[in-house]
Image (spheres, rainbow, N blue to C red):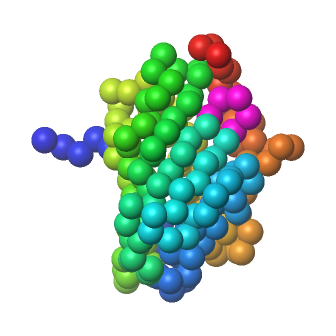
Amino acid sequence: MSDTNYRHYITVQAAPDEVYEAITRVNEWWTIHTEGSTKALGDEFTVQFGDVHLTKQRITEAVPGKRIVWRVAGSHLPWLKDREEWKGTELVFEITVAEAGTQLTFTHIGLTPQVECFGQCEKGWDYFIGESLFKLIVEGTGLPDTTARTHMDTIGHVHPKNA
């Protein structure tokens, strides 16, 4: 059986510990609307994108320079039929040394083509991992969502239909 979970790879010229540290600075690459601690095993934090995305993550694995895993403990996505579609999914960041630099493999376990949000969420992760987190690591400044700028301006807006 093939693995159909969403996956994205980036390779950067940075040390594994620097990549790990950048991942933990969620408000600098995902959204400034982040509350809670995002650094250590057991930490919990929420991220919010206006009225279309509110999730709570718990850090279930944290091995600096190698791997960090966030389990989605709560999900409110009012633009989907199943508002809790992300609940119980895992966001896995694996860091390895490669010939060309340090490789980050991001996998959203549970985000498969069979779930409603896949198309839009795939575009979102492509932006946040492939552009925003990449820029944070290599240039020092990411492209997180702010009140004035949203990734949906780039990938297309969704609207809460179940609110």
Q: In this view, does 31 lie to the left or right of 58?
A: right
Can the viewer see residue 146 in this picture? yes
Q: Does the magenta stretch include residue 13?
A: no
- In the figure, residue 14 lies in which quadrant? bottom right
| Total marks in image | 0
Across and down, in percent, residue 99 comes to 37, 83
- In the figure, residue 27 lies in which quadrant? bottom right
Name the image quarter holding the C terminus: top right
Viewer-closest of 125 and 109: 109
Name the image quarter holding the N terminus: top left
Residue located at (52% from left, 63% from top): 43
| Magenta region, residue range | 49-53
Residue located at (86% from left, 43% from top): 148
Q: Is residue 79 left or right of residue 141?
A: left
Instruction: Name the residue furthest right.
Output: 148
Residue located at (59% from left, 22% from top): 78
Can the viewer see residue 119 in this picture? no
Viewer-closest of 3 and 34: 34
Across and down, in percent, residue 124 comes to 57, 42
Asked if residue 79 is positioned above or below residue 21 in the image, the reply reads above
Residue located at (67% from left, 21% from top): 159
Across and down, in percent, residue 5 comes to 32, 44
Asked if residue 133 is positioned above or below residue 107 in the image, the reply reads below
Across and down, in percent, residue 66 comes to 39, 77
Instruction: From the image, give the main secondary structure of the stretch colored magenta.
Output: loop
